[in-house]
Every structure is written in structure tokens, then in C-alpha cells.
Image: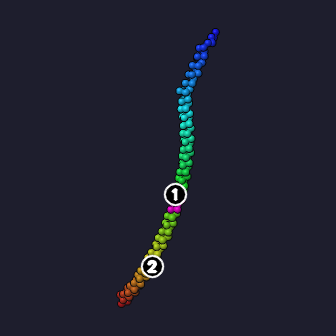
Amino acid sequence: MLNLDSSLFFVALLVWFLLVVLNKIYFKPVGQVLDQRESKIESESSRIETMTREIDEKTQQIEKKLKDAKQASARIKEELIKKGEEAREQLLIKTRSESQKLRETRMSELDAQILAAEKKLSQEVSVFSDKLKEIFIG
């Protein structure tokens, strides 16, 4: 059977000493390294989450500014189109008015020329008729 003598006590003492030495040399430093690594991972994770939130907020701000800029450019474009159409209409009205005035001027000139031609023709007809009377009547 099992013989309990001083060697059992010596083995127990050696195991205890080995545990103390291993705890001091290996387990505590490894535990500290693991704790440091875990705290570093947690701090980096929280930093990453913070940065991700900041990026999301800035992205939303940029998207909002872009949307506002697109709306503003659309409004400006519409205003410019309206102004262009108004300017075109005014130019058309002005051009029509000028062409109407020019047409009226030309028509009055033509009327004056027609009257002058009719007057001259009537004079020439009267001279021609006088000459015909002389020729035929004698």
C-alpha cells in the first residue's frame, strides 16, 4: 500500500515551491501581459467605435451639404433659365417692335413713291393724251 513517510512531505514542499516560483516567474507576468493586451484591445475598440461614429456623423454632414448644394444649384439653374427666357421674350418683343416700325416706315416710303409715280404717270398720261389728240385730231 501507500507508505507515508517524509518523502511525501518533501514532495508536497517541492510542489508548493514549484507553484510559488512558477507563479512569480511565469503566471503573474503572463497574466499581466494578457491584462495589458486586453486593456489595450478594449481601448482600441472604444477608439475605433468613436472614430466610426465621427466618420458616420461627418459623412452625414457631407451628404446633407451635398444635397443642399444640389438643391441650391437646381434653384439657381431654374432662376437662370427663367431670366434667360424673360430676356429672350423681351428681345423678341423689342425686335418685333423695331421690325414693325421699320415695316411701317418702308410702307410709308412705298406709299409716297406710289403717289409720286401715280402723279408722274397722270402727268405723262395727260401729255400722251394731248399728243394723241394732236396726232389724231390734228
Amino acid type for the residue under numbered disc 1: Ser
Residue receiving disc 2: 108
Magenta stretch, overall SS: helix
Between 49 and 122, the one lying in front of the other is: 49
Image location (x, y in percent) of residue 138: 36, 90
Its colouring scheme is: rainbow
Number of marks in picture: 2
Q: Classify 123 as above or below 7.
A: below
Q: Can the viewer see residue 33? A: yes
Residue 61 in the image, given as x and y percentages of width and height: 55, 51
- Circle 1 sits on which residue? 73
Q: What residue lies at 54% left-to-right and 44% top-to-bottom? A: 51
User: Magenta residues, as a range?
Assistant: 73-81
Give above or below for 47 relative to 69: above
Q: Nearer the viewer, residue 80 or 5?
A: 5
In the rendered view, tell whether residue 121 sits above or below residue 33. below
In front: 94, or 53? 53
